[in-house]
Image (cartoon, grey):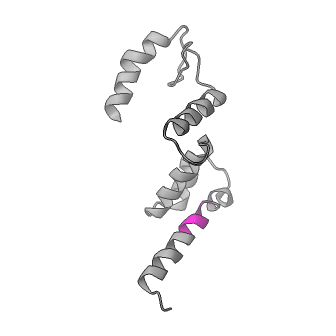
Amino acid sequence: MKDSLHRYIHHVRPGLMKTEHDVLFVNNRGNPLSDRGIQLIVKKAGLQAQLSKPLHPHMLRHSFATHMLDNGANLRVVQTLLGHENLATTQIYTHVTIDKIKSEYQKKFPNI
């Protein structure tokens, strides 16, 4: 990943840039990548991967938050990374973690 990002920054991006700006990811015209552009890229990746459901950027965000919490990240850290002002907004992601905890508990203690 580090090598890919380095190659993009130093070799691909400069060839796309038409005007100077500080946005890292640009479209094929050198303009900042728009929300819609990101949606199209993610949708295309989902189709190429032959996923059973359409892929959306929010799914990646949700997966990121859930995996962070599942692996012990502090809720406040996840809140900061997601840019949520209110902790209650971030707590929405904990429901999946709680479901995982219940599932793991049932595996270890099926008779309880």
Q: Residue at x 53, y 52 (%)?
A: 63
Is 41 within the magenta? no
Quarter occupied by the N terminus: top left
Question: What secondary structure is the magenta-colored segment mainly?
Answer: helix
Q: Is residue 5 left or right of residue 33?
A: left
Residue 25 screen position, x and y as percent: 51, 25
Which residue is at the front of the view, 50 or 17?
50
Q: Is residue 54 above or below residue 62?
A: above
Outermost residue, bottom side = 111
Which quarter of the picture shows residue 23?
top right
Residue positioned 54% across, 14% down in the render: 30
Residue 71, placed above or below residue 7:
below
Find the residue positioned furthest to the top. Answer: 18
Q: Nearer the viewer, residue 68 or 27?
A: 27
Q: Residue at x 54, y 15 (%)?
A: 28
Q: Residue furthest left?
A: 3
Residue 97 picture quarter: bottom right
Rendering coords of residue 12 (x, y %): 41, 17
**First to last magenta residue range:** 93-98
Question: Is residue 95 found inside the magenta-colored segment of the image?
Answer: yes
Q: In the picture shown, does residue 105 fall above or below 99?
A: below
Task: State the image quarter where residue 40 is shown.
Answer: top right
Q: Position of residue 88 (x, y in %)?
A: 68, 61
Query: Number of labelled discs?
Result: 0
Q: Residue at x 61, y 42 (%)?
A: 56
